[in-house]
Amino acid sequence: MKTKITFLVLSVLALVFMSSCTKRCRCTKFNLETAYYSKEEVKATGKSCSDMRFLDGLHTPYYTYCEWTYTE
């Protein structure tokens, strides 16, 4: 009985991990256009997602806001 319950729990956990969502940084411009950056792209810039508002070389924000979203 314990073996069946353990197998069922492990099966459910495996399904959850295999169908997990993808974390992306969503940045919205002032004209409501949206750009998405992967975790790797954000990491490569050396910034956090919220710091992606500012492009390199610009002192004013390029995006209205940037936030992490989870998508399939």
Image: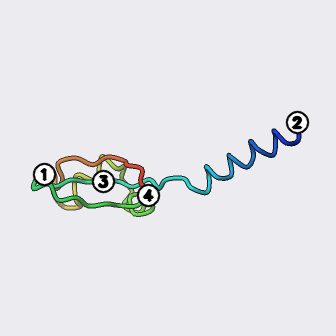
Closer to the observer: label 3 or label 1?
3
Closer to the observer: label 2 or label 3?
2
Residue 37 location, quadrant? bottom left
Which element is circle 3 on? Answer: strand
**Label 1 sits on residue:** 60
The type of residue carrying mark 2 is Lys
Mark sitting on residue 39: 4
The type of residue carrying mark 3 is Arg
Residue at the extreme top: 2
Structural crowding at the residue carrying mark 4, measured as other residues with C-alpha within 10 Å and reported as few (<14), some (14–19) or many (≥20): some
Say if mark 2 contacts mark 4, CB within 8 Å.
Answer: no
Closer to the observer: label 1 or label 4?
4
**Label 3 sits on residue:** 26
Circle nearer the N terminus (3, 4): 3
Q: Marks 1 and 2, how far apart in space?
A: 60 Å
Circle nearer the N terminus (2, 3): 2
Structural crowding at the residue carrying mark 2, measured as other residues with C-alpha within 10 Å and reported as few (<14), some (14–19) or many (≥20): few
Say if mark 2 contacts mark 3, CB within 8 Å.
Answer: no
| Picture coordinates of residue 59, whole percent (x, y) | 15, 53
Which element is circle 2 on? Answer: helix
Q: Marks 2 and 3, how far apart in space?
A: 44 Å
**Label 2 sits on residue:** 2
Which element is circle 4 on? Answer: helix
Q: Marks 2 and 4, how far apart in space?
A: 39 Å
Circle nearer the N terminus (1, 2): 2
As drawn, is 11 to the left or to the right of 69?
right
| Picture coordinates of residue 22, whole percent (x, y) | 47, 56
Q: Marks 3 and 1, how far apart in space?
A: 18 Å
Say if mark 3 contacts mark 4, CB within 8 Å.
Answer: no
| Picture coordinates of residue 56, whole percent (x, y) | 23, 61
Residue 38 location, quadrant? bottom left
